[in-house]
């Protein structure tokens, strides 16, 4: 990209002009010709750097790669400036929020001739620490020419980047024992043609010979065959509460919500399960359950827009959206996971709506901080009341048979998730 340069005098040129002017004025006023000697050097420098000989254009190239990454990944931004006759080139980068940058220095290739072109290359290493769509830059470039007497400033826009949330820790995908979905990779209580051992039983006509357990048959004096658990698929629907974003940036409730959703979606989609997504807190958004790598991309893209502004939060309501959620969004065999900070009564209303449709969801509590107040301050009583309200909400969810799983963004969700799924009442439809 070629950019026209518009030079302005620098402080050095103004100082030289001031010294020359004062020397001439002093020589005239005092009639001391020796004072003119002080004006010689500034005048020579000013005459030797005429403005007409300054470079008119600059060739600028910016390279940012990759444009999509995950929290904590490294990006490389490289700036290359080619200017004929420039003395030096400086650059300053404006960083996106919560992005660490390491300036890896620059290298300058000098011009081979007095009128040749010098190339300056500057390189930064960027590490975004928070998910979202961010604008990198602008880059402020300062080109100095004419012996440091003139400078031109350029404002360069850089590409936007998409930073996906880091996946929450989940060692493997787990599922309830009662599964009504089609064939998949999760063992169920139903005997079938899977690979996980489920027990032995007496031989019946039509059983395969290779399933005979010869050791058990010899021990009991009869013919017994091995049984294997039937393998079924698992439908998971993630319901995200984006009403409030509480806590420090980087570990707020919204950050943990999208990281938990990313980890769950990534793990279950790798197991060839189907994953759907519903967000409430502003206008209702949903993503139909589906399987495959493309669904993970859809989920990650949907999570990029879960930061509603205040007007959307005020307009959003539970009854407005979830009651009218299409039936295909919640298949009868799906397991529903509600990720919420439990800061108001909306999660309870969501659970009641889901139970009205025949589901018993799992609730993941992502609130990890609370207001810091002095023990005897007037706000201390309000904080205690707020704690009791959260405890009452957790107890009420427990009376409905809904497990509440606290998660701080660090621990592995697998064990607690499996325990919560196993504790779902068998009368509910999962």
Image: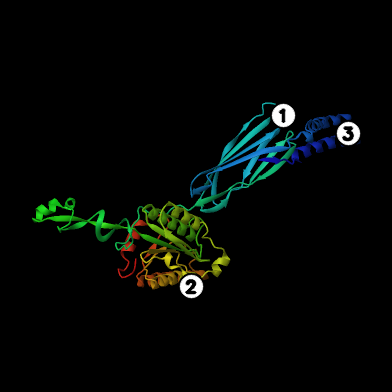
Residue 388 visible, this angle: no
Determine which residue is flagged by label 3: 27
In front of the other: 163 or 255: 163
**Which residue is drawn at the image coordinates 81% and 37% (left, top)?**
17
Q: Secondary structure at mark 2?
A: helix
Classify residue 20 as left or right of residue 384: right
Residue ID for mark 2: 319
Residue with the mark numbered 1: 115
Quadrant containing the C terminus is bottom left
Residue drawn at 18 percent across, 50 percent down? 210
Question: Mark 2, mark 1: which one is toward the viewer?
Answer: 2
Q: Residue at x 64, y 41 (%)?
A: 91
Which residue occupies the foreground of this view, 354 or 134?
Answer: 354
How packed mark 1 is, by other alpha carbons closer than 10 Å (few <14, some 14-19, many 20 or more), is few
**Mark with earlier residue (2, 1):** 1
Viewer-proximal residue, 232 or 410? Answer: 232
**On the rendered structure, is 230 left or right of 398?**
left
For mark 3, give the secondary structure.
helix
Figure check: 277 above or below 146: below
The residues bearing labels 2 and 3 have C-alpha atoms spaced at a distance of: 88 Å
């Amino acid at each position: 990209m070629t950019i026209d340069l518009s030079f302005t005098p620098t402080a050095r040129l103004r100082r030289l002009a001031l010294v020359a002017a004062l020397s001439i004025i002093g020589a005239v006023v005092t009639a001391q010709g020796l004072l003119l000697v002080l004006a010689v050097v500034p005048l020579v420098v000013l005459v030797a750097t005429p403005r007409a000989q300054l470079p008119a254009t600059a060739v600028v190239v910016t390279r940012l790669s990759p444009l999509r990454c995950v929290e904590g990944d490294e990006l490389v931004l490289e700036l290359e400036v080619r200017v004929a006759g420039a003395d030096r080139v400086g650059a300053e980068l404006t960083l996106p929020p919560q992005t660490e940058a390491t300036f890896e220095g620059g290298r300058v290739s000098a011009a081979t001739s007095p009128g040749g072109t010098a190339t300056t290359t500057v390189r930064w290493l960027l590490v975004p620490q928070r998910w979202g769509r961010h604008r990198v830059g602008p880059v402020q470039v300062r080109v100095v020419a004419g012996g440091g007497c003139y400078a031109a400033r350029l404002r360069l826009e850089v590409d936007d980047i998409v930073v996906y949330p880091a996946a929450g820790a989940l060692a493997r995908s787990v599922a309830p024992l009662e599964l009504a979905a089609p064939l998949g990779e999760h063992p169920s209580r139903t005997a079938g043609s899977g690979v996980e051992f489920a027990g032995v039983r007496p031989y019946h006509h039509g059983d395969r010979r290779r399933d005979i357990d010869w050791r058990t048959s010899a021990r009991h004096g009869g013919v017994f065959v091995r049984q294997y658990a039937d393998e079924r698929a698992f439908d998971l629907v993630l319901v995200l509460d984006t009403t409030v974003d509480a806590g420090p940036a980087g570990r707020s409730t919204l950050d943990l919500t999208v990281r938990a959703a990313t980890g769950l979606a990534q793990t279950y989609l790798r197991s060839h399960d189907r994953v759907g997504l519903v967000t409430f807190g502003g206008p209702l958004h949903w993503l139909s359950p589906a399987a495959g790598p493309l669904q993970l991309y859809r989920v990650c893209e949907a999570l990029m827009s879960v930061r509603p502004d205040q007007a959307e939060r005020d307009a959003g309501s539970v009854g407005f959206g979830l009651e009218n959620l299409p039936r295909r969004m919640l298949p009868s065999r799906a397991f529903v996971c509600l990720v919420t900070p439990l800061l108001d009564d909306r999660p309870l209303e969501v659970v009641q709506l889901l139970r009205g449709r025949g589901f018993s969801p799992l609730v993941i509590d992502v609130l990890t901080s609370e207001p810091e107040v002095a023990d005897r301050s007037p706000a201390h009583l309000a904080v205690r009341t707020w704690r009791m309200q959260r405890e009452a909400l957790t107890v009420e969810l427990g009376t409905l048979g809904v497990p509440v799983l606290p998660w701080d963004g660090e621990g592995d969700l697998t064990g607690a998730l499996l325990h919560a799924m196993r504790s779902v009442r068998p009368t509910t439809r999962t």
